[in-house]
Image (tube, rainbow, N blue to C red):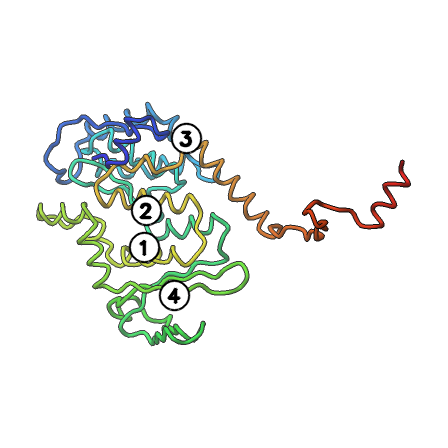
Amino acid sequence: MDTLMDRVLSATGGGRPAPEQDTTPAVEPPVGEATPAQVDAVQEYLDKHGDRFAASLPAHVSYEAFQAAVAALLPRLGRCTPASLRMALLTCARFGLVPDGYEAAIQVQGNKAVFIPTYKGYVRLMYRSGLVASVHCGLVHEHDEWKVTPSAPAPDDFHLSIRPDLSDEERGKALFAYAFVRLKDGSRSQVVYVNRTKAAQLRDEWSYGYRLAVQQGREDSYWHQHFDHGMQKSALKALFPWVPTSAELVALAKADDAGERGDVQIVHAPTPETAALVAEAEQAHRAAEGSQEEPARLPVKRNAAGRRCRGKKQRGRTAAMR
């Protein structure tokens, strides 16, 4: 489903390519794994467009690793429409994330495939931007020792003590997620928190995939399977107003939000060409950060009529040159 902005830009030639249209008729949501014939058909389709995936991946991501992750997904995604699967994988490739469930996942919504970046994918792009020194995003469990005092100065505003010898189950249920970054100058950003109630509100309001699964009596949406990870990702996104963010990271959030709404995602993903330009511009910006001060200028002398006038030394030098 295109957004209003997508339709306007497409109709007026506003510089953003029209999204690939999926004309496959709507079918019942997939149940179980695809048949071998369906898997072979989708694999053949993806092999045909393999050069596009390879060209979209940044240099640091191996196409072989990307292809292996996709092959492992096909038994589950073989029932999705080929166009939706292709768009989801292209979006994933253009952000340089591998759909292995660690940095990103490809989720089924009805009969369509949807790209979902995990909170670790957000962390990866934060480090890739080079704008922060370190990223911290975790969970506070009910048996942890913690204290939050927003009015206290950092680092006394947030304290967390855990026992490394305990498993997550022994630490108890996750109460809330937190996120903050260490900046290049050694300072720490504000700490943001998202508890289970807030995460559930965001899920219920924005996640089309979750609502669709509930309507169809299924519990296979990303929020069903990875609620705590969704809570952590929500905390990282809530951190954006307080930390420096790259154009690529902002684009990832827009693509993620589009997938949550059930909208087209690939229009937000950078092309290989624009990704290279963005990286070059960000590098130039960081290099220029320390040289933004303009050199001091001497005051300009003016006569009673407001015209520029020269001092005695300058008039003497001018006369000597004649």
Which kind of residue does numbered mark 2 sit on?
Answer: Pro
- Numbered disc in front, either 4 or 3: 4
Which kind of residue does numbered mark 3 sit on?
Answer: Ala
The disc, 1 or 2, on the residue closer to the chain's N-terminal end is 2
Q: In front: 298, or 80?
A: 298
User: Residue 3 falls in which quadrant of the image?
Assistant: top left
- Numbered disc in front, either 1 or 4: 4
Give how far across and how far down residue 233 sits, in percent. Answer: 32, 55
**Residue position for label 1:** 233
Q: Residue 117 carries which label?
A: 2
Circles 1, 2 touching at the beta carbon (< 8 Å)? yes
Give the vertical position of 290 relative to 2 (above or below): below
Give the vertical position of 8 relative to 291 (above or below): above
Mark 1 to mark 2 CA distance (whole Å): 9 Å
What residue is at 16 percent from the left and 35 percent from the top? 111
Mark 4 to mark 3 CA distance (whole Å): 38 Å
- Numbered disc in front, either 4 or 2: 4
The disc, 3 or 2, on the residue closer to the chain's N-terminal end is 3
Q: In front: 186, or 82?
A: 186
Circles 1, 4 touching at the beta carbon (< 8 Å)? no
Q: Say which quadrant the C terminus sits in.
A: top right
The disc, 4 or 3, on the residue closer to the chain's N-terminal end is 3
**Residue position for label 3:** 54
Give the vertical position of 195 relative to 97 (above or below): below
Which kind of residue does numbered mark 1 sit on?
Answer: Lys
What residue is at 28 percent from the left and 30 percent from the top? 19
Circles 3, 1 touching at the beta carbon (< 8 Å)? no
